[in-house]
Image (spheres, rainbow, N blue to C red):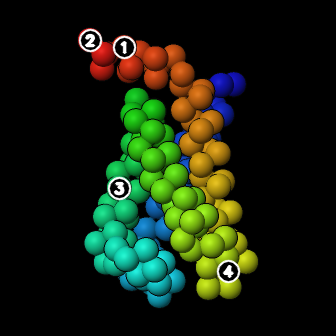
Amino acid sequence: MKYYIERISSVATAVILLQTLFFKFTAAPESVYIFSELGVEPYGRIGTGVLELIAAGLLLVKRTSLIGGILGLGIISGAILSHLFFLGIEVQHDGGLLFGMAVLVFILLAINVILQKEKLADLIRSVRN
């Protein structure tokens, strides 16, 4: 059962991340607005998109899903903190949809990493040695 929950959380997260790439890579007005407000347009938008693409790819492969989960947590934490400290919960009258999606992705990624805690412990041990 643990395997299926991890896979579902990984694939669902990857789908969400891949879906947002369209907006980042096509310079959708809302995406450009967000990264302009943060003062990192266009490099932040494109760089974040590339990192999200890498994280999504890693999440889709069981063997690398832990690394994708960790990378994704870092990326989405930045998005959540940007909303909380700079952008606000609601961006351009979206009713908080982007913030809500970021929180959902964070939860799914946290599930992914927690369910692979043994693998994470092995990874930490290998980095220490």
Is 50 located above or below residue 117 in the figure? below
Dot placed on the residue nearer the N-terminal end, 4 or 1: 4
C-alpha gap between disc 3 and disc 4: 24 Å
8 relative to 51 in the view: left or right:
right
Q: Which disc number belongs to residue 79?
A: none
Dot placed on the residue nearer the N-terminal end, 4 or 2: 4
The picture places residue 53, in percent across and down from the top left corner, at 37, 57
Dot placed on the residue nearer the N-terminal end, 3 or 1: 3
Report the residue at 37% width, 62% height from top.
Answer: 48
C-alpha gap between disc 1 and disc 2: 6 Å
Tag 4: residue type? Asp
Tag 2: residue type? Asn
Residue, disc 1:
125
C-alpha gap between disc 4 and disc 2: 47 Å
**Mark nearer the viewer, 2 or 3:** 2
C-alpha gap between disc 4 and disc 1: 43 Å
Q: Could you tell me how many numbered marks the image carries?
A: 4
Residue, disc 3:
51
